[in-house]
Amino acid sequence: MSEFEKFFSSIIDWFTQGESKTKESSTKQQGVTVLGSELAAAGIKEQERVDAGGFAESPIGDRTFGDWPGSIRLLKPIQGELDLHILKLTQKYAEMNADERFEMRNSLCQGDMYTLFHYCSRATAFALRDSSCSEFLQNAFITLSMVDLERVDFRDAFRAIHFVQYGFHRLGLESGTNIELARNLAGNKMADIMTPPKAWMNETSDNRKIYWSKEVHTRFGVGFVSTWDHPYDPKIDLLDIGILLWNIPKGKNWVARDIFIGSEVPQWFFSVVVPEIHSVLERALGTIRVSAIPNPELDCPPHVHSLSVYVVECATPADAKILATKCIGKLNSRLTASFVHFKELCAIVTYDNSWKKDDLEDERSIQRFKEPVASILQNFQYLSRDDK
């Protein structure tokens, strides 16, 4: 796995928890991925490290977080070998002297550091789900002290800090000692941002939100789901439908990547955006999206091909019918397959290929998702959230 491929694998794991919405454009420059000005600057620093050479082999190697069998991101995370490896690496780092710690930080590539960010969100989820797993969380601030802030988007570092702080707050743990220890072990710039502003904790206390993630309780227990900023107040448990849809993309081409709540329905789904469509979307109570990326066995870039299943809870069955009948079938490299609505729900599967070549789906193949998605909508136990 090349540095570039490893970076993309790590960063997609992290971004699909919600952070990607802060990024604007994506290009490849001198072997470093550029996603917005902040990450572009970090990419330059990473390239300088690579050009200078002289660093040790990464202690993380080619490993990145994937979805273990039966796991569903942070809704149902399952511990794996890499979680334990990073925990032991963190404990080893804490025992090093200043020169050894510098060498350790410098050995980590940009992708490694995004893997550490992902680890911290997992550590928080593990601790909230099972108090016997709190060791992951207790060490997470020290894990973050291994990050070289100049070689990552500082907003992603803030988000990881916030995730860990949230875990301490929810469990009623005092974090001051852990933060101070981590600050003493970190590089100067990372040490400077290790204490989250109090305003974050006020937001955390009131809304149980972490940037664009939110704590939720599902059939699997406590977990976190990615959120967008669009109105989300459904009467039906759309998140539970999203969990049931998780296995739909699985096959030779796709693996599910994340579930988002409060998603926006893109306007390009519809051949003509008329006032009728706009009004239907304005009245909708909420939308979820299950996203998928290419199966790693295909060896194709995960940032080029995307598959998504949207489920919209409309205000009325008539509104759902309008959405289902107004979807386009194909627009350039984008495909949609609209489904016969069921009650107030409309489900739409979309495929996009930004390279516009080597398609993984066509107008015929995408229709195979229609029957299993429709079956889930028709057989779902339609209890409102208040009935559960």
Image: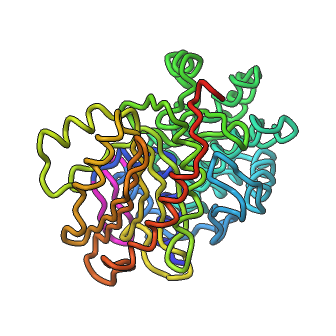
Count of numbered tags: 0
Magenta stretch: includes residue 29: yes
Asked if residue 355 is positioned above or below residue 244 in the image, the reply reads: below
Relative to 198, is 327 on the left or the right? left
> Could you say which is closer to the camera, residue 323 or residue 126?
323
Q: Residue furthest right?
A: 132
Question: The C terminus lies in which quarter of the figure?
Answer: top right
Q: Please name the colour scheme applied to the rendered image.
A: rainbow
The location of residue 329, given as percent across then percent down, is: 25, 67
Relative to 265, is 378 on the left or the right? right
| Residue at position x 24%, y 72% in the image | 333
| Residue at position x 52%, y 67% in the image | 249
Q: Quadrant of residue 360?
A: bottom left
The location of residue 38, given as percent across then percent down, is: 35, 46
Asked if residue 332 is positioned above or below residue 343 in the image, the reply reads: below
Asked if residue 331 is positioned above or below residue 179 in the image, the reply reads: below
Question: The N terminus lies in which quarter of the figure?
Answer: bottom right
Q: Quadrant of residue 327?
A: bottom left
> Could you say which is closer to the camera, residue 38 or residue 80?
80
Q: Is residue 4 visible?
A: no
Image: magenta residue range: 25-38
Asked if residue 304 is positioned above or below residue 357 in the image, the reply reads: above
> Could you say which is closer to the camera, residue 96 or residue 7?
7
| Residue at position x 66%, y 39% in the image | 218
> Could you say which is closer to the camera, residue 329 or residue 371?
371
The location of residue 358, given as percent across then percent down, is: 33, 84
The location of residue 7, given as percent across then percent down, is: 49, 64
| Residue at position x 72%, y 44% in the image | 220
Q: Is residue 103 visible?
A: yes
Magenta stretch: includes residue 43: no
